[in-house]
Image (cartoon, grey):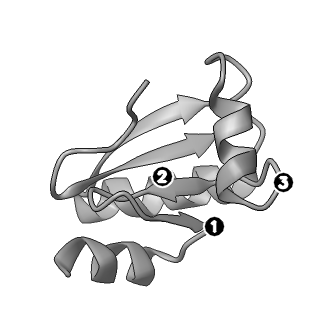
Amino acid sequence: MDFTPENGTITMFSTTWCGYCNRLKKQLDAQGIGYTEINIEEVEGTAELVEQLNGGNQTVPTVLFPDGTAATNPSLAEVKSRLAA
């Protein structure tokens, strides 16, 4: 399954209990940045994908950008910068 987001948006892999995920979602909402949230505990195969992107760790939030690159627990500034590039 391809989780690559459309230009100008991100895909965020998260869990319901992740405080860093909730903080980033609030920041994205406040800035009007679109995102698709994927709960790695509910969507089959996504925990393994996050592990591959993070050297074997299931670290969230892991963000996927339209260019196919990923970032682990990025700041709002990093998300905005990478979307603008």
Give the residue pinned by disc 1: 73
- Label 3 secondary element: loop
Residue type at mark 3: give it. Answer: Asn
Question: Quadrant of the image for the C terminus?
Answer: bottom left
Q: Residue at x 38, y 72 (%)?
A: 79
Q: Position of residue 37 (x, y in %)?
A: 47, 36
Quarter where residue 44 is shown: top right
Give the residue pinned by disc 3: 57
Q: Is residue 29 above or below residue 76?
A: above
Q: CA distance from mark 2 to mark 1?
A: 11 Å
Residue type at mark 2: give it. Answer: Lys
Q: CA distance from mark 3 to mark 2?
A: 21 Å
Q: Residue at x 78, y 38 (%)?
A: 17
Chain-order first, disc 2 or disc 1: 2
Q: Nearer the viewer, mark 1 or mark 3?
A: 3
Whether residue 25 is visible here, answered yes or no, is: yes
78 sits to left or right of 41 = left
18 sits to left or right of 49 = right
Q: Nearer the viewer, residue 83 or 34?
A: 83
Q: CA distance from mark 1 to mark 3?
A: 12 Å
